[in-house]
Structure formats: C-alpha cells, structure tokens
Amino acid sequence: MADPSSYRPKPGEIPDSPGVYKFRDEHHRVIYVGKAKSLRQRLASYFQDLAGLHPRTRTMVTTAASVEWTVVSTEVEALQLEYSWIKEYDPRFNVKYRDDKSYPYLAVTMNEEFPRVQVMRGHKRKGVRYFGPYGHAWAIRDTVDLLLRVFPVRTCSAGVFKNAARTGRPCLLGYIGKCSAPCVERVSAEEHRELAEEFCDFMAGRTGTYIRRLERQMTDAAEEMEYERAARLRDDIGALKKAMEKNAVVLADATDADLIAVAEDELEAAVQIFHVRGGRVRGQRGWVTDKVEAVTTADLVEHALQQLYGEETGDSVPKEVLVPALPDPVEPVQEWLTGRRGSIVSLRIPQRGDKKSLMETVQRNAQQSLALHKTKRASDLTTRSRALEEIAEALDLDSAPLRIECYDISHLQGDDVVASMVVFEDGLQRKSEYRRFQIKGFEGQDDVRSMHEVITRRFRRYLSEKERTGEWADGELKDGELKDDEGRPKRFAYPPQLVVVDGGQPQVAAAKRALDELGIDDIAVCGLAKRLEEVWLPDDGDPVVLPRTSEGLYLLQRVRDEAHRFAITYQRTKRAKRFRASPLDDVAGLGETRKQALIKHFGSVKKLRSATIDQICEVPGIGRKTAETIAVALAQAAPAAPAVNTATGEIMEDEEPGTTAGSSQEPVSAGTSDERRGQET
C-alpha cells in the first residue's frame, strides 16, 4: 500500500486550468482517469487526510504510485480526452458500464449494392442503418415479416444471393412475394435501393405517408374493379398497422428523444435507456455497473452519455436527451453532444406532462433491472472478494492476489506439445491477456520440463520489458512505453501476484525453480492437483486442503479449468493442421486451387508422386518449371508409413485426396490423463 504523500506533486507544479489526469500503479498501469475544470483544485482533493476520503477513493490513491496530467483548452476537450483514455486504458477504478444483455438491432446494409435487412449485434458498422435496440431477436423478425409484404427487400445472405443469381432461380421468398428478387433481375439495383430507403423511412417513424398512399391505391383499384389487387393492398395496410401497433405512441408530438434513468445503491447502479423516435418507443436497453469510485447520480449520467454517444454521429444522437440529473457543469456535455450530432441537442430534466410520466416508467424499469441483477448475481462482488481473501489466507500471502495467472501443458502421446496461460484479474477472466506457447526446448513428453520452459520464457520476457523500458533505472515511464506499435498492451508487461499450475508437487517445483533462476522472489506459486483438488506449495511435503464449500477453492478450480480448456483447444488445432498436411504444402507458389487441380487430375498424392514431369504439365495451370518443382518436392518427401486396419490387419492404399498415407488415422491411445480429461469436458 503506497503512501499518497510519496508521489504528491510539489506546490505550484499543477496548473490551474482544465485538463485530464491519470493515476498509475507501481507497474505503471493506468488505474484511474479523470477530468477537471481546475486540475490544481481537483488533484489537491486526492492528497488530503486519508480518513477524510471516500473508502473507494482511499483505495485508489493508496494503490496508485504516481499521477500525471495533460492540460487542454476547454472543458469539452477534457471530456473528449477523458473518454478516449478510458477506452484506451480500461482503468480498473473508473465506472465501466456493462450491458445486461447483448441487444439485437434491425439493420439495413445500405453500404451494399443490394441492401439487406437482417438482425445484427455488436459494434455498429459504417454505412449500415440501425433501428432498435430490441429486447429479443424474434421481435425484429416478426416486424420484418409483416413489413416485407409492402417493402420486399432482400433478407438473404451473400451465399444464397450469389447462388440464386448463378442458377437464375430466386429463393422461396421471391416466389411468395416477400422479396423483389434482385438476384434474378426482377428489379434493378436502383429500384431495390429505393425500396430499402422506403423501408428505412417507415422504420424511422414516417409511417403516415405510406399508409395514405396505399389507401389511395386500394380505393383506385376497387373503382377499377381490380378486386384482387385491392384485397392485397388491404392486407398490406393491415400488416403495416399491425407493425405500428407493436410500438404504441407515448409522446403525441412525434418527439425524437432518449430518456435515461438511474437506480442505485452504495455498491451498484443500473441505467435504463428508452429510445423514442417519432413519438414511439423504438428500443430499450440497460446497463449495470459496480460503483468502484465515489460518484453521484449526475456523474453516472455523464458516464452513460459518454458510453451511449461516444461513437455516434448525426441522427444517431437525438435532438433531445432527458435525464434524472444534469452533469455539473452541463454546458460542456451539451456542447459535446451538439458536436456529435451536428446540430443543437437539448439536455434537460423533464418537469411535467407526458415526458415526465414516461421518465417515471423508465425509472421503474431501472429499479426493476437493479433488483433483478442483484437476484441473479447475489453477493457477486462480495463472493469474489471473499474467494481472493481465502486464497491469500490459505497460501499465507501478504495481500489478496488481484492478478492470477494459470499454466497448463497439453499434448497427445508427446506430439504437438503446447502450453496455455490464462489470466484472472479481480476474480474475473481477462481474455485479452491469454497467451499460448509451443514447447521448443526438447522433443517428447515431459510435463515438468515443459512447465519449467514456459514459466522461464514468460517471466524472462517480463524482466526484459522492465529492463528495456527503464523501469529499473529511474522508475519513470513515458506514455505508450507499455504498449506495442499498434497501441495494444505489450505481452507480459505486468506480473501476477500468484502463479497457479495445473498439476501437483513436481510441476510446482519446476515453476518455482524457474522463478528462482530468474531472481524473482515476490510472486507466489501453487499447484492444483486434479485427483483430490489439493493445493500444493513449493517445498511443502503435504498439500493444503481447502474445504469443498470454499469460495477460494472454487475460484482456483475455475482458473485451472479455463487454462486446461485453452490448452486443449490450441493442441487440437495444431494436431488438425498436422493431419491435414501434404507434401504439396512445401511447394513454393503452389496455391490451394492448383493443389486441388493436381489431386483431382491424378486422384491421390501417391499417383502424383509416380507421374512424370510431362504428365504433371498436362494439368491446367501447371507449367514445366512448376512441374519440375513439384516432382523434386515429392521425391524429397519421404512417404508416410501405410495405414493399417486394426480389425483386419489389411494395409490400406493411399487414396485420400490431398493427404499423405495414413494422415487421417487417429492414434488408438487417448494420450495423457490431461488430454483425456480435456476430451471429456
């Protein structure tokens, strides 16, 4: 635990101007990012008597080892830079909203020649128009099914579209009138794009125009005694009205607005957002966050606005945003939103009328969301903390291991030996920090030597990073020195407090010996044996046995099982690549198309190997120089041993296209117990 006075800036060093500041820990990792109208006043508040600080703020300043700041011209620039740094550094003490579900959107791919209507999740793409989010994907499909009667836009995948264009036959939707079938040129690209534009206009709330137009067409058809056409138009009108009924009018003045409500307690907060377009609720979403810093409702609202609109521009930012509390000060946030939209955005608290009533509804949803979250994840944060404390107590550690790394070795009868490294921070997976290793130091099966090699390589990289960045020299680092050329965190830049190995006393001893050889003595090591779930420590003849109901044991099991899963996945990938290998893979400049042409022409690699250069030249696309290269490569490659049918003893011919003999035969033995365990999982 650091003393904040040890890194407190000297009087007069901090400027009295707007800016953004970063707190870093002892490993120079950014743990908190904040902005301030006056850097001097804000930073001074962190270095008062610890007893007067909020408990979470006290934890942050005692975890930090340094503070730095960047001066900007305006508070709007400070808001933008704060958002950028939070996304870049992912600080552990900043509020981070997490979606309580992955929300589906109705998307229209206007960036394609023939726009497609589909369900999309995840990050938004440029040139795609989105509507929603919806609570369920089936709600989108129901709406689209109704609207395709009137706006028969393409919904098929690229593969189905190309196949229909090749065969000249549309899919089923084209036959039943729910697709205009641009694949077979029933409509031109321009006509189909116009349909997609009309579909988007209807989804954006401009519904009256299309209803009135269809009603006129229905009346005209009836007057001309085209009763079948009039009946189809009547059904189309009914479909549109039914689709409209799915979103009841909530604001009579066709308002475009987002309503944000917050429900919170001392530890967590839930945010609910209603997206209202054209006076109708077009989408709803919610977030939940741990309050890892001392924040007010206004602060939570400001963070929610950054999360919502940080990547949005244009009409994606509505004209009006209604909130339960205004950020202080409100002007920079409002100016930032206006800049994102390109026109004035109103940010205010509703006081009366329909908007206040709707805000009360959003507030009730936020409260229900928080209650549901607490029911689902009861004592989740408390449980993780208790698990880390139990591990620290059982292993006699000085503090809870906030970063745990676990290693596992996987192979199949000594072939394709690989290792995995998984990382858990604060009891949660950190998948971006997972790493995979190929064992290079020796051939064959030796889990103990493999573990020693992996631990040595991982921590030698850590030491070299420390030495290269000058961390040992003066303790000062510039921005980006813990990041690679592409801005990602460098591999092995941060050390764990605990190393866990999958195995018993031999594996633990190997890991400890590797650390000792590197001169590292401040990282704890333990192993978790599968048979009795015993925890082994270096130099201890007896294991530590944690109670079966222990949260600490449960966390260690999760870490170990995740490392095992990751190792097995990598090992199987390597094995599959080896089984698919062919002598033709070593021929320079020979791609998949020509390899397939060779195998198709000769039938097998065995027959290709016995062919003359002139016969190889007969294959389309193969010249004499390439044929000579192929012949030399096949002559140098030793034929694999023939595959044997273990039931009959028969030697099977090499007739498997594109492979060497026996390459598809799996070994009979299931390999090590570790491998069998991974296959059963």
Image (tube, rainbow, N blue to C red):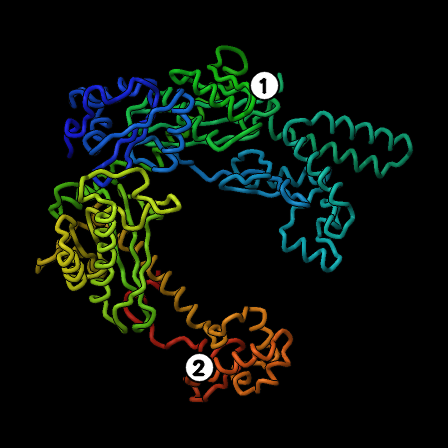
Report the residue marked by disc 2: 637
Task: Give SS at disc 2.
Answer: loop
Q: Amino acid at mark 2?
A: Ala
- The answer to whether residue 375 is above or below residue 445 is above
> What residue lies at 88% left-to-right and 36% top-to-bottom?
226
Q: Amino acid at mark 1?
A: Leu
The Cα atoms of the two marked residues, 2 and 1, are separated by 76 Å
Q: Quadrant of residue 107?
A: top right
Comes first in the chain, label 2 or label 1:
1
> What residue lies at 54% left-to-right and 22% top-to-bottom?
257
Instruction: Indicate which label's residue lies in the foreground, 2 or 1.
Output: 2
- The answer to whether residue 469 is above or below residue 527 is above
CB of mark 2 within 8 Å of CB of mark 1?
Answer: no
Mark yes or no: residue 140 visible.
yes
Mark drawn on residue 106: none
Mark yes or no: residue 645 visible.
no
Residue in the foreground of this view, choosing between 677 and 116: 116
Report the residue marked by disc 1: 251
Q: Quadrant of residue 373?
A: top left
Residue in the foreground of this view, choosing between 22 and 406: 22
Q: Quadrant of residue 1?
A: top left
Residue 556: give x, y in percent of width and height: 23, 50
**Around disc 1, counting alpha carbons within 10 Å, would you say few (fewer than 14), some (14 to 19), or many (20 or more)?**
some
Residue in the foreground of this view, choosing between 196 and 502: 196
- Left/right of residue 443 with respect to residue 105 in the rendered view: left
> What residue lies at 43% left-to-right and 68% top-to-bottom?
577
- Left/right of residue 119 with respect to residue 63 in the rendered view: right
Residue 402: give x, y in percent of width and height: 23, 42
